[in-house]
Amino acid sequence: GAVVSQHPSWVICKSGTSVKIECRSLDFQATTMFWYRQFPKQSLMLMATSNEGSKATYEQGVEKDKFLINHASLTLSTLTVTSAHPEDSSFYICSASLAGAETQYFGPGTRLLVL
Amino acid sequence: ELKVEQNPLFLSMQEGKNYTIYCNYSTTSDRLYWYRQDPGKSLESLFVLLSNGAVKQEGRLMASLDTKARLSTLHITAAVHDLSATYFCAVDISGGGADGLTFGKGTHLIIQP
């Protein structure tokens, strides 16, 4: 089946620094990639939708200047959390989809802790 | 705005028992997904339901979709401890994979020996 990887799997950073998370589709070219955020004991919330070569579409309430998304190729999307604060600590999960595919393929997630 | 409601949100049951998790959604959609999440892990895809009346089974789990009622169910038969996890349903309103998914709040399932 289709495999999506994320790197790093976990990261600890100081408040005020920026953190980049990579999402890669390993064995297919993804038409679209999605970024979700999950706070402890809560559900997943869609943050943004990313298409290769286009600007990402952000969900209401998600600051595009804080969560920078770059989708440079059909196999790689990156999420950069800029000037991270403790409230940004969360589990970030990406997914990737193919045009016409039945489902999205989820990555293993990146756990971010901002001190 | 699409809303996805699951119930119950928490379920503790004994091994060997049967139970059903319900997922209601507010907007027309014919794509519904069920996922399992273990603590500290990402999502594991369980079922993809793509049409009204779809029914899928895998082991002790069976999922169904009624698009007219905007309702999906996940039925657990003769539960075993290994099924303890959080189960999410999610809806794709675009029908073509172009939009992200809207998730229910999840059902935290504990199966006691």
Image: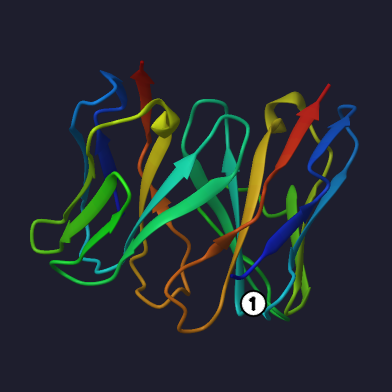
Q: Quadrant of residue B27?
A: bottom left
Q: How is this picture coloured?
A: rainbow
A84 versus B48 height, above or below: above
- State the residue at coordinates (37%, 21%): B110
Residue B48 falls left or right of residue A16:
left
Identify the residue position indicated by label 1 in the image.
Answer: A30
Please state the horizontal and vertical placement of residue A74, each as a whole percent of the image.
72, 79
Residue A67 falls left or right of residue B39:
right
Quadrant in which the C terminus of chain B appears: top left
- State the residue at coordinates (28%, 71%): B50
- State the residue at coordinates (78%, 43%): A9
Quadrant in which the N terminus of chain B appears: bottom left
B29 versus B9 height, above or below: below
**Of helix, strand and loop, which one carries label 1?**
loop
Observer-nearest of A1 and A34: A1
Please state the horizontal and vertical placement of residue B20, each as a whole percent of the image.
19, 37
Observer-nearest of B41 and B98: B41
Instruction: Report the number of discs.
Output: 1
B40 versus A47 height, above or below: above
Q: Quadrant of residue B16?
A: top left
Q: Amino acid at mark 1?
A: Ala
